[in-house]
Amino acid sequence: MREYTNIVAFYSPLENLADRVPEHLALSRVDYSQNITLDQYNKFLNSTLKNIPGVQIIESNPTSLAGHPGYKVVYLSMPSKIRFKFQDMLIWTMIGGKVYNISFNAEAAKYPTFLPTIQKMINSFQITR
């Protein structure tokens, strides 16, 4: 069993009437009742992404999050009924069976514009409990 807990999300304001979707950064925590390792979770997530039609993984690397070992994956996705691409970044770490996940989602064309600010937010993240 797993329990999903969305902790917080930050959304950019829409720029104008033509702006389709606000870029956003979200923090969530998933509690697993079964033991799962960071590497197992990484393999599961990458395998899941590879099997989603319209998803192209750009980067998948070890990293750290809040001073803990973690993983990062960046990918492009083009939902079937939407005519533009999204670029997403997921960064996660695991502490005591809890997966802490930060996700950033933006239209692919705007992703580089928001990335420096998003990276500062990610770098400031701390796990205090």
Image (cartoon, rainbow, N blue to C red):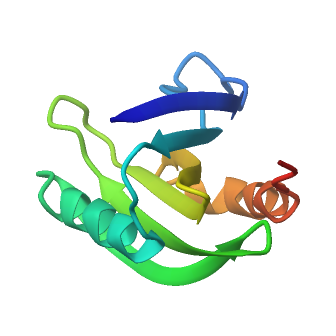
Q: Residue at x 31, y 60 (%)?
A: 45
Left or right, 60 with respect to 100, comes to left
Q: Residue at x 56, y 29 (%)?
A: 5
- Of 48 and 30, nearer the camera is 30
The answer to whether any part of residue 51 appears in the image is yes
Left or right, 49 with respect to 38, comes to left
58 is higher (above) or lower (below) than 33: below
40 is higher (above) or lower (below) than 80: below
Identify the residue at the far front of this view: 34
Left or right, 105 with respect to 123, comes to left
Q: Position of residue 52 (x, y in %)?
A: 15, 52
Q: Position of residue 105 (x, y in %)?
A: 52, 45
117 is higher (above) or lower (below) than 27: below
Q: Position of residue 78 (x, y in %)?
A: 25, 46
The answer to whether any part of residue 110 appears in the image is no
Q: Position of residue 58 (x, y in %)?
A: 37, 75
16 is higher (above) or lower (below) than 112: above
Placement of the N terminus among the 4 image quadrants: top left
